[in-house]
Image (cartoon, rainbow, N blue to C red):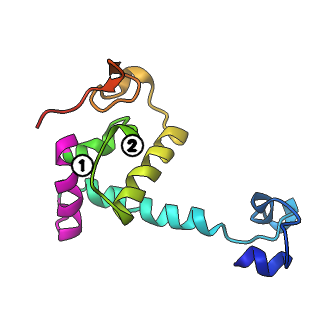
Amino acid sequence: MTFKFLWKGPDKVTRNSVVNSVENGGLNLMDIETQIKALRLSWIPRILDSTRKGPWKSYFDHYLKPYGGTFLLKCNYELKDLTPSLNGLYLDLLLWWEEFRNTFSDINYAQRIIWSNKDIRIDNRGLKIVV
């Protein structure tokens, strides 16, 4: 809606350039999609915090139990290898965490966990945790 209002037709410049600062030739607009991802990814430390309890955390852990529960968030999983029946926030969270982890991870391959690791495959299937 913002871009339709701004340009009143097709985009005149790329959307990425519009979120740049004015000094860098942009309009200093907020990237709403990135903001939403950042807010949702802020749930990861809460989920991994063993002292926090709540139905939201139990629901997430319940559906990830076949994959090791919240341990999965520490793995190098690929979402298409999993078949969780999650939706909404939880599915987005796994998808965006995978994207974030792949983009910004500084762990070398020797330090990665072998379970649910997209780089370690047998018969084109990842190693799954047996619960």
* Residue appearing at x 28%, y 50% in the figure: 84
Residue 31 is situated, as x and y percent measured from the top left of the image, at 66, 66
Magenta segment's dominant SS is: helix
The mark lying in front, picked from 2 and 1, is 2
Q: How many marks?
A: 2
* Residue appearing at x 39%, y 40% in the figure: 80
Of 107 and 76, nearer the camera is 76
Q: Is residue 24 left or right of residue 4?
A: right
Q: Which residue is identified by label 1?
A: 70
* Residue appearing at x 17%, y 43% in the figure: 66
> Which amino acid type corresponds to the residue marked 1 in the rendered image?
Thr
Q: Is 122 a magenta residue?
A: no
Of 10 and 43, nearer the camera is 10
Quadrant for residue 7, please give it.
Answer: bottom right
Identify the magenta region.
51-68
Residue 117 is situated, as x and y percent measured from the top left of the image, at 35, 29
Label 1 packing within 10 angstroms: few (<14), some (14-19), many (20+): many
As drawn, 69 above or below 31: above
As drawn, 7 above or below 104: below
Q: Is residue 112 left or right of residue 98?
A: left
Q: Is residue 14 left or right of residue 46?
A: right
* Residue appearing at x 18%, y 69% in the figure: 55
> Which amino acid type corresponds to the residue marked 2 in the rendered image?
Leu
Q: Is residue 41 left or right of residue 61?
A: right
As drawn, 58 above or below 119: below
Q: Which residue is identified by label 2?
A: 79
Who comes first in sequence, dot 2 or dot 1? 1
Quadrant for residue 129, please give it.
Answer: top left
What's the distance in space between the residues labelled 2 and 1, CA to CA? 14 Å
Residue 126 is situated, as x and y percent measured from the top left of the image, at 31, 27
As drawn, 36 above or below 14: below
